[in-house]
Every structure is written in C-alpha cells, then in structure tokens.
Amino acid sequence: MKIEIRNLSKKFGEQKVLDDINLTIKQGQKVAFIGLSGSGKTTLMRSINGFVTPDNGEIIVDGKKIDYRSKKEVKELRAKVAMVYQLFNLIERTTVLHNVLTGTLGKKRVLSESVAVGIGFFKKSDKKKAKDILEFVKLADKHDERVDSLSGGQKQRVAIARALMQEPKILLADEPTANLDIKTGKKILKLFSKINEKEHTTTITVIHQLELISEKYFDRVVGLSNGKLIFDGHPDELTHEILTSIYGDLESSEDDEEFGDE
Ligand SMILES: Nc1ncnc2c1ncn2[C@@H]1O[C@H](COP(=O)(O)OP(=O)(O)OP(=O)(O)O)[C@@H](O)[C@H]1O
C-alpha cells in the first residue's frame, strides 16, 4: 500500500519531535528510517499505524486519509499494518504455534489476554495457515517448542510469522535487529526482503546498525535529525558527508560523548 505523509508535525510538551515531514512511500518499497536516538523515527512510524496522533498534517494510506479520532478506522488501519519490535513482544511461556496464532486475534485483545486463549480456540484453517507461515520463516520444526527456549533470531522469526498471520499490506519494524548479532540481523532483513518479493508488502524498518543498510535489503533510506527529514535517497547515496549530517562526527571518540548529547 502507498503511504503519503504530508506536513506532519508532532510535539511532546515543548519538544518538536516531528517537524513538517513530507514523504511518499510507494506500494512495495523497502524503506529504512535512520537517525540518532530521539530524532523521531519511532514517532513517525507510530503515526502510520495510528498509535501516535500528529498535531498537524496528514497521512494517507492507500488513498484514505487516516482519521485518528475514529476508533473504528484506526482499528481497520491496524489490521492492514503489522508491527515487529526490537524485543519481539512474544508470550515467552507458550509455544511458537500459539504465539503465531495470536496474530489472528487482531488488536482488540491485549497480549496478556491472548495467552488465556487456548490453542483449541483457533480454527483448523488458521492452524494450517500458521504452520505454512512457520515453514516460510524456516521454523517448521519448532511449532511445539516454548518461545523461551529459542534464540533471539528465532524469536524474531516467530514475531514476523505472527505479523504475517495478519496478511499485512504494510510491515513496520522498529529496530528488529537491535538485539541480534550482525549475521542474524542480516538473516532477518533477508526475510523481510523475501516477504516483500512474495507479497509486495510495503516495509519500513527503523535501523541503527549502519553495516546493515545495503541495497540488498533496502531500496530507500530516509534520514531524520531533530524531527526533520534531512535525507531521502538510495543506500548507495549515503556518503560519509551525509552520514555526518545525520549522526554528527562519526570519527569522534565515544569516550568524549556525554550521555546528555543523546
Ligand atoms: N509518548 C511520549 N511522550 C513524551 N515524549 C515522547 C513520547 N514518545 C517519544 N517521546 C520523545 O520524542 C523524542 C523522539 O522519540 P522517538 O522514539 O520517536 O525517537 P527515535 O528516533 O525513534 O529514538 P530511538 O532510536 O532512541 O528509538 C524523544 O525525545 C522521546 O523522548
């Protein structure tokens, strides 16, 4: 689905977190959001699925302007927009299959309630679908294992499988590789590319590890700084100069930086 962001602004207290953002993301694009901590990446992402209500401007998803005041419309939007998180947000003490099946419950139930829904609650057809998706994410042999016995990379694949149960048109991933080593992170990004190829899903990924920003995984990079969009281009165009404008002096010793600069 196409996403059109027009003159989007958001303040938290006195702080301008998003400052007049304009961005159009075509159906099927694979976009990385980059920028320093606090630059507004998550807030921008959360405006797309209605978790954050902007102060000014608008977002149009698939030709329809998001009406943040309408619970019904936001719910419909979230059915099409799946989210994957840095800390996986899984129910650790239940099985892989159970977690993936909760992807069918929609956003009306909170995660803690989902656990109360036994595996018998789900339709046979959903179980078949969940198993097919687990095969797609290469976890076919893990259906019945408890999530807390899995590695970080496997947990993230369970979270992606759960998101796919929703058959999303847009996939938002907030630092999905932050808790993984680089090799495992690459596998996760490869999986997003595979989903994108198969379903033509529009994907937006907030990412911090610069070594993972390559045209293999992304066809567009959007850089934010202090709530402003300051770069929009192909991964190849990320020169040292541009990276410095986004992150500041990359060569400066970390020891010189105070936490207060974050
Ligand atoms: N609900 C909120 N209430 C108040 N301030 C908020 C809220 N959400 C975010 N902020 C502030 O807005 C700023 C931007 O936050 P945001 O999470 O969008 O940045 P980010 O670029 O995603 O950072 P990070 O890379 O650390 O996740 C930060 O200063 C943050 O503290």
Image (cartoon, rainbow, N blue to C red):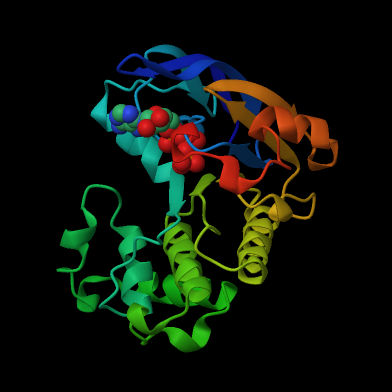
Asked which quadrant contains residue 84, the reply is bottom left
169 relative to 36, above or below: below
Location of the N terminus by quadrant is top right
Asked which quadrant contains residue 23, the reply is top right
x, y percent for residue 192:
62, 58
211 relative to 54, above or below: below
Q: Between residues 43 and 118, which one lies in front from this camera angle?
A: 43
x, y percent for residue 26:
67, 32
Please tell me how many numbered marks the rendered image carries: 0
x, y percent for residue 151:
47, 79
Q: Is residue 161 left or right of residue 199?
A: left
112 relative to 73, above or below: below
Q: Is residue 225 left or right of residue 245?
A: left
Answer yes or no: is residue 89 visible.
yes
Q: Residue, x 64% and y 42% (percent of image)? A: 32
Q: Residue, x 24% and y 77% (percent of image)? A: 119
Q: Between residues 90 and 13, which one lies in front from this camera angle?
A: 13
- Ligand 1 resides in the quarter of the picture at top left
Q: Residue, x 60% and y 28% (percent of image)? A: 224
Q: Is residue 224 left or right of residue 69?
A: right
34 relative to 194, above or below: above
Answer yes or no: is residue 50 visible.
no
x, y percent for residue 169:
53, 45
Q: Residue, x 37% and y 17% (percent of image)? A: 11
Asked which quadrant contains residue 211, the reply is bottom right
